[in-house]
Amino acid sequence: MATMTNGHSKTKIHTSIGLKPEIRQKMIPMLNQHLADLFDLMSQTKQAHWNVKGPHFHALHLLFDSFAEGLEKYVDVVAERITAMGGYANGTARMAAANSKVKEFPTDILAGREMLKALTERYAAVGNSVREGIDVSDKAGDAATSDMLIDVQRDLDQWLWFLEAHLQEQG
């Protein structure tokens, strides 16, 4: 039985996953960081969804909501991977806010183009962090975590492409 510290107390969590404890001990904090960042990115995307204004309101409102739904799925997947590995998922909004490395979303913008720019910057940063997590988990020999993060990365890259496409001018 693995003993993990959740930050407040010791919790005994059993797992029969065939990863060495030292690999799990390395993956769990990294995954908790991704959990915080993805949760924060999801909430920032909802912030943009609720507050966007301008001539492309409807399209952006729907686009941002679809991204937030996709991120919610990955928040759940990452949290469940943490607990399956015998860790403790730090998954409350307050925990995410305290631990996220994602830059705070600006509260002084409403225009669609400015929302797109702010989200583009944040999706790129989270995407780069997840890409690093893929390398870390791959080098550690945790193929399942690497594979899971590749799925996250694939969607983050596509969503980033969608955001950037809205910012490109024809000409």
Image (spheres, grey):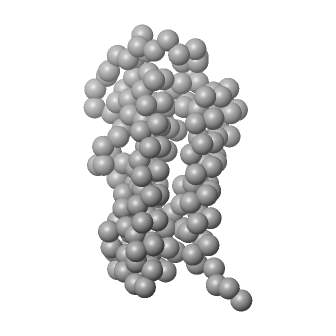
Residue 37: % across, % down = 45, 51
167 on left or right of 9: right
Closer to us: 110 or 70: 70
Residue 154: % across, % down = 63, 49
Furthest-bottom residue in this view: 171
**Could you tell me which residue is drawn at 32 percent across and 21 percent down?**
11
106 on left or right of 74: left
109 lies above or below 4: below
Quarter occupied by residue 82: top left
Residue 156: % across, % down = 57, 54
Q: Can residue 104 be seen?
A: no
**Could you tell me which residue is drawn at 51 percent across and 26 percent down?**
25
Quarter occupied by residue 90: top left
**Could you tell me which residue is drawn at 56 percent across and 69 percent down?**
163
92 lies above or below 110: above
145 lies above or below 167: above
**Could you tell me which residue is drawn at 64 percent across and 46 percent down?**
132
Residue 46: % across, % down = 36, 62
